[in-house]
Image: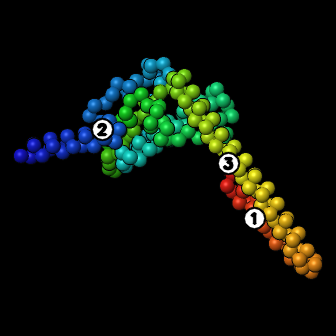
Amino acid sequence: MNAICITLAFVLAQASARAEGIESDSARPAWVEMSKDKLPLHTDVIKSMPYATAEDARAQALEEAAVRALNFAAESAPKLKEVWQVPSWLVADQMLRAPIHVEEVDWDFGATLAPMHVAYVYLDLSPEKRELLLGKWREELMRRRVHQIGGGLGFVLVCLVTMVTYLRLDDATRGYYSRWLATGATATVAGSAAALYTWIV
């Protein structure tokens, strides 16, 4: 009975790992053990630091892989690194040659050994993937420009409305409250400019 329970638990653990897109450490893929010079062309393997949980190791490996993908894309567009970051989800969805492999290792903390997790990402760095990254960057750049144009037009509209309102109120009050109206108009324009800067940046 105990053997059946252990076997059932192992099968459930394997199914859970596959459902998360993570290979278990019982079936270590060959690419994990390959040295850099033995890997196929246009590929790379990213290894995480040891973490207490498999999910943390997986997340850190994806972050490192995203940095590697950004450097790869920047070979064709150097300015890319200054204005964009490759999202981890994009790496996980479209740039993997194989499922992420996570394995449990015994980590030496001096007096004791504790189980930790290390994740491996098999990254696809083919020319097609570079074009994919550059395309995503162009889409992001276009969205930013649309936001900037829309924000600029909105700021101009606020300035015009403020000016018209100021002139009408100043005329209606025969100039008695010009200083206060000018202060209010200035505050309105300054607040709009600050909001625009925050929204764009």
Amino acid under label 2?
Answer: Arg
**Is 32 rendered above or below residue 102?**
above
Amino acid under label 3?
Answer: His
Q: Is residue 200 left or right of residue 48?
A: right
On the image, numbered disc 3 is attached to which residue?
147
Q: Quick one: SS at disc 1? A: helix
Q: Earlier in the sequence, mark 2 or mark 3?
A: 2
Which residue is found at the position 47% from the left and 24% from the top?
A: 43
Which residue is found at the position 91% from the left and 74% from the top?
A: 171
On the image, numbered disc 1 is attached to which residue?
191
Q: Nearer the viewer, mark 3 or mark 1?
A: 3
Q: Which mark is residue 175?
A: none
Q: Is residue 38 left or right of residue 135?
A: left
Q: Earlier in the sequence, mark 1 or mark 2?
A: 2
Asked if the residue under mark 1 is in contact with the one under mark 3, i.e. CB atoms within 8 Å, the reply is: no
Residue 96 visible in the current orientation: yes
Residue 98's quadrant in the figure?
top left
Q: Label 3 crowding class (10 Å Cα cut-off): few <14, some 14-19, many 20+? A: some
- Image spot of residue 119 (x, y percent): 39, 38
**Is 129 rendered above or below residue 11?**
above
Q: Which mark is residue 18?
A: 2
Q: Is residue 82 left or right of residue 7?
A: right
Residue 196's quadrant in the figure?
bottom right
Q: Nearer the viewer, mark 2 or mark 3?
A: 3
- Image spot of residue 200 (x, y percent): 69, 51
Q: Label 2 crowding class (10 Å Cα cut-off): few <14, some 14-19, many 20+? A: some
